[in-house]
Image (cartoon, rainbow, N blue to C red):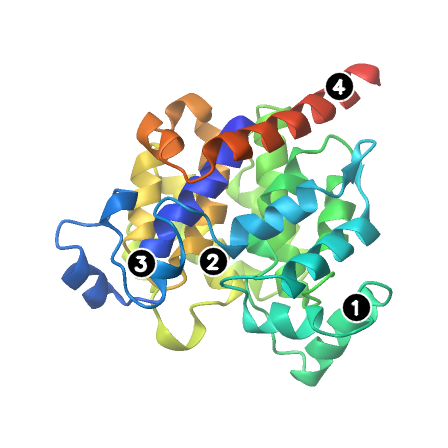
Amino acid sequence: MLGCFYGQAVGDALGLGTEFLNKDEVHKHYPNGLSRYENIIQDAHRRRWHKGAWTDDTDMMLCILNGFDNGKFDILQVAKNFKDWADGEPMGIGAHTFKVLAMGDYVEKHDECSRLWWELSRRQSAANGALMRTSIVGLVQNNFIEQTEDICRLTHYDPRCIGSCVIATSIIHNLVWNDKPLSYEEIKNIGSKYDFRLEEWIDLAYKRKYISELDLDETHSIGYTLRTLAAALWCYWHANSFESGLLAVVNEGGDADTNAAISCAILGAKYGYNAIPEYYIKSLYKEREYRHKVDNFISFATNEKNSN
């Protein structure tokens, strides 16, 4: 579990360094590639965060964590946590998530608000704002699929978003609780339950040798949930270590913090906490505070197992 939590935060924090850059810009700013927080350029976007700080991806994951009670997530509390966060200083919040959470009656009518904005997009909005925060839901022992669906729909109603999240949490859950990596066929079968459009991106991630073939910096759809899912699946299948996957996805640019957050949450679950180089953990901004939160969650989650 600890590897998943730290993979999420590390990927998010380093990915900020190349977020919204195309590959040419990444090479210009980081001729030797970005591999350390202290080398993150300080432009108008990135200087808002301390070096080594995570962004909205992990902020929202912590909102979910703070809604954990008696072995499951309290959906109403998670919705309230999202709303409180959005009403504060939600640096990096995505446009779709902002629209949903800005509605005055969101907490009481979160499902209706989420569906409304999806309908207003002519059912086209399928951003990655739910996938980026979903890793934690795979760490609960029971009913994780239903909870994944419910938490995704708090802001993202499209079946592509829901399917993306369920694939990610299913991979994480099986690695952590069952020590079992899901196969290509098993992942395709999960995707087929939600939307036929997932299959193309699952195939792309599985069959492409190089992550560059996913075009993660493609200008018009960098925030598409299936593009981010493909990045995570590519790392799951092709990265032979945590760090190699982290650096591969970060240096592709695009929506790099989100792509790296979910990719590295999965890699952390696969390879474990000890596979994450110490530098990335110890140099996280507010690492001790983060460790306290995740240790408490892990204690409660594992005690649930022992009490059953």
**Labels 3, 1: front one:** 1
**Residue under label 4:** 303
Residue closer to the observer: 75 or 212: 75
**Residue under label 2:** 228
Amino acid at the residue labelled 1: Tyr
Q: Which quadrant of the view contains residue 172?
A: top right
**Element under disc 4:** helix
Q: Residues within 10 Å of mark 2 (few under 14, many from 20)?
A: many
> Residue at horizontal 30%, vertical 44%?
37
Q: Give the mark nearest the N terminus, 4 or 3.
A: 3
Q: Give the mark nearest the N terminus, 3 or 1.
A: 3
**Labels 3, 2: front one:** 3
Amino acid at the residue labelled 3: Thr
**Residue under label 1:** 106
Give residue 71's position: percent from left, percent from top: 80, 32
**Residue under label 3:** 18
| Residue 189 visible in image | no
Q: Are marks 3 and 2 in contact (CB under 8 Å)?
A: no
